[in-house]
């Protein structure tokens, strides 16, 4: 077994300077700071949008219930979107490091599948909420316009929504799917390395 | 064990494991640091259900496997400060060859052989990776044969 001993000896000769723990803690701090900034930015974005919408509500004094429902739907849509993207997706990523590799890979696979589902579902819900909100919100003002203008306004808005719905969203979702599916395949291949008995 | 003690005890071992996995010292250092960040975060929850070593190696192995998401990693631009760290005079070519051979094995085998060379018991390796001890034994045996064979060839040509 001379070779074995040699390998072990060689293996252990590889040594690096142990980086100071200060460097590690600096990384942890940077990581926390980054998360904090993200939280602050999320909140500011949410707050500003809500203030703006509140201002519109206050200034134009909508009379119809549809307008108010529209505003609420739009706010819910934005809150949901920001919440999922900034707070929930990261939660999905960093779990299970203490499991054994076999369990970890299975977990990673499950998480990636969930992430794929969540991303496309949330994107759809967000968009449906926002479009419905916009539709209801515009109703009151469109009713005050002359008919041709009202039709034109709705036509332009819905053309835009249709382009986003039928072109941009499917494209983004497909891109994300391709990316995650590739990753899923790789993770599955890693898992297979462990399930095939030698 | 305090975090500092764990860090001092396991840094080299974890770094070697990562080196065996990626064979790139900067990249390995990053993975090792990520590992210790997780250790630091999870330490308050550590309940001695497994030994400290098993626990740390599990975290390190999973961070290595996680690199599947970063395989298009660009080589980092090296700042002068980094170069001084990378150029270690005592890394002889045999060590380099060993790490190169290991990094060419299938991913999970890299972890298993690295742990074996680190003198981790085979029962524990089975526990870290999540396969049977018999399977670990067979794999290690086979990999050692391959490595010895490669080394014989290497020595013939050098």
Image (cartoon, rainbow, N blue to C red):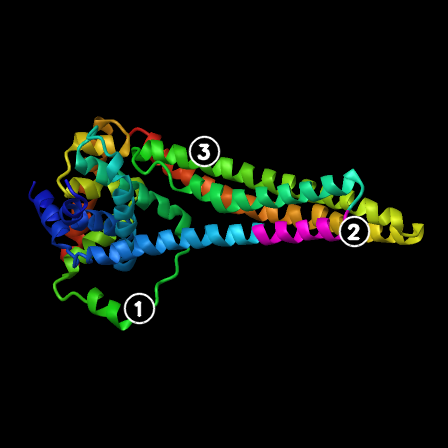
Residue A125 occupies quadrant: top right
Pointer 1 residue: B78
Q: Distance from label 2 to label 3 (Cα)?
A: 39 Å
In screen coordinates, is A151 left or right of A100?
Answer: right
Q: Closer to the camera: disc 1 or disc 2?
A: 2
Q: Is residue A48 magenta?
A: yes
Q: Do discs 1 and 2 share a chain?
A: no
Q: Position of residue A115 (x, y in %)?
A: 50, 39
Pointer 3 residue: A110
Residue B136 occupies quadrant: top left
Q: Do discs 3 and 1 share a chain?
A: no
Q: Which residues are magenta?
A: A47-61
Please report contact status of discs 2 and 3: CB closer than 8 Å, yes or no. no
Pointer 2 residue: A157
Is residue B23 at least partly visible in the picture?
no
The structure residue drawn at horizontal position 42% and vertical position 55%, both measured from the top left corner, is: B72
Q: Chain of mark 2?
A: A
At mark 1, the secondary structure is loop
How many residues crowd mark 2 within 10 Å: few (<14), some (14–19), many (20+)?
A: some
The structure residue drawn at horizontal position 16% and vertical position 51%, both measured from the top left corner, is: B151
User: A39 or B115: nearer the eye?
Assistant: A39
Q: Earlier in the sequence, mark 2 or mark 3?
A: 3
Outermost residue to the bottom: B80
Q: Is residue A89 magenta?
A: no
Please report contact status of discs 1 and 2: CB closer than 8 Å, yes or no. no
Q: Chain of mark 3?
A: A
* Quadrant in which the C terminus of chain A is drawn: top left
Q: Position of residue A170 (x, y in %)?
A: 65, 45
């Amino acid at each position: 077994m001379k070779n074995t001993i040699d390998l072990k000896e060689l293996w252990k000769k590889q040594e690096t300077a142990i980086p100071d723990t200060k460097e590690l803690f600096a990384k942890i701090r940077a990581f926390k700071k980054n998360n904090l900034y993200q939280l602050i930015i999320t909140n500011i974005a949410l707050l500003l949008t809500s203030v703006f919408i509140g201002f519109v509500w206050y200034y134009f004094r909508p009379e119809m219930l549809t307008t108010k429902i529209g505003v609420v739907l739009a706010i819910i849509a934005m809150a949901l979107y920001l919440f999922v993207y900034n707070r929930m997706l990261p939660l999905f990523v960093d779990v299970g490091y203490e499991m054994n590799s076999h369990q970890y890979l299975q977990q990673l696979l499950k998480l990636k599948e969930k992430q794929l589902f969540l991303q496309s579902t949330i994107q759809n819900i967000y968009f449906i909420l926002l479009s419905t909100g916009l539709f209801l919100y515009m109703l009151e003002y469109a009713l005050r316009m002359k008919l041709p203008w009202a039709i034109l306004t709705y036509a332009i808005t819905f053309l835009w929504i249709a382009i986003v719905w039928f072109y941009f969203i499917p494209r983004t979702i497909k891109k994300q799917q391709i990316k995650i599916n590739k990753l899923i395949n790789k993770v599955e291949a890693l898992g297979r390395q462990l399930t095939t008995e030698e | 064990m305090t975090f500092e003690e764990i860090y001092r005890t396991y840094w080299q071992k974890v770094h070697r494991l990562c080196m065996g996995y990626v064979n790139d010292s900067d990249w390995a250092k990053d993975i090792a640091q990520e590992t210790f960040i997780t250790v630091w975060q999870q330490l308050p929850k550590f309940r001695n259900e497994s030994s400290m070593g098993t626990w740390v190696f599990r975290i390190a192995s999973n961070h290595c496997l996680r690199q599947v998401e970063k395989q298009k990693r660009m080589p980092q631009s090296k700042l002068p400060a980094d170069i001084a760290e990378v150029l270690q005079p005592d890394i002889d070519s045999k060590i380099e060859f060993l790490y190169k051979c290991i990094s060419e094995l299938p991913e999970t085998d890299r972890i298993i052989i690295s742990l074996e060379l680190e003198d981790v018991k085979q029962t524990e390796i089975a526990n870290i990776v999540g396969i049977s001890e018999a399977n670990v034994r067979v794999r290690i045996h086979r990999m050692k044969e391959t490595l010895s064979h490669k080394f014989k060839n290497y020595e013939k040509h050098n």
